[in-house]
Image (spheres, rainbow, N blue to C red):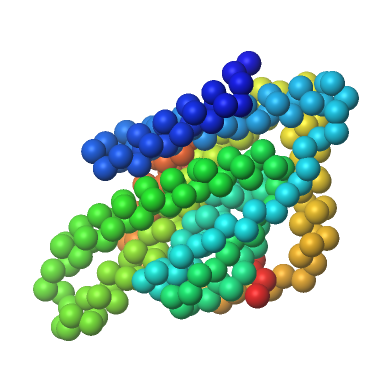
Amino acid sequence: MATTPNIAERVRKLLDKAEDAAVTPEEAQTYAAKAAELIAKHNLDQATVRHREGKRPEPIKLLEFEVSGQGWHGKARASLIYSVAEAHGCSVCTLGNKMNGNVRWVLIMGPAATLKALDVLLPSILIQAEAQGMAAAKAHMAERKGMFDTAANANIERRTFFRSYLPGYGRGVAEKIAVSREAMAEKVKGKTGELVLVSAAERTKAAFDKQFPDLAYGREDKHNVAGAIAGHRDGRNADTGQTKVNGNGSAAITS
């Protein structure tokens, strides 16, 4: 079994390649896919060893992931983070997630090793999503050149497209992660690994419900269908690089 320092180094190298502006989107997605799969398998192996040795399971922790509100795109970024974190088996809510330019937080609860991995993966996925989203928005506006009566209306279209792209990308990535996790769970069915996965899920839910007993749902934002479709399409190619599937998600908030 590879050591934790070796895994961390391999993951960092893969994500550095994924974030390199010189690589194609397809290459970036492949690198990110390898990083996510490597981390998930390593964490399960480590947790299984702990269980077999009679050690206590790793603690359930809370990650307060800060999200920028720059450009008033904070809610879109938070939605992406929410979907990806939830797909990793974590329980999630947001704090201060309003339509403004302020910082807000995505609160992610799960096993310590999973949160440590997400703290590395999420910024990389967000970087890739924003870069591809800006390129997609530029192409979208080029196709619609001359269709808007004022520059202000054109700018509204561009912003709404981008804000719809990011959540769509997050949902696409989340679906790929879900498929990967289902495959991993199937491989350990009837084995110690299955008990480890079930225990982690139950402990995460119990800890989350205890800490956040009263959650409310936020207002839905305006969406651009083309942006949501483009983001979802590109997101399905990211992170795990496996079978394409369909699905959707929603977000609970606390303020």
Which quadrant of the view contains residue 238? top left
Which quadrant of the view contains residue 141? bottom left
Residue 105: give x, y in percent of width and height. 58, 64
Camera-side residue of 73 and 226:
73
Residue 212: give x, y in percent of width and height. 76, 65
User: Among all residues in the image, which is located at the extreme right?
Assistant: 54
Camera-side residue of 13 and 163:
13
**Is 28 left, or right, of 247 in this rendering?**
left
> Would you place residue 5 above or below residue 175 in this image?
above
The residue drawn where x is 79% and y is 62% is 211
The residue drawn where x is 82% and y is 26% is 51
The residue drawn where x is 59% and y is 18% is 2
Residue 83 in sight from this viewpoint = yes
The residue drawn where x is 56% and y is 47% is 119
**Is 15 left, or right, of 91 in this rendering?**
left
**Is 62 left, or right, of 151 in this rendering?**
right
Camera-side residue of 87 and 249:
87
Residue 248: give x, y in percent of width and height. 53, 55
> Would you place residue 21 above or below residue 206 in this image?
above
> Would you place residue 15 above or below residue 134 in this image?
above
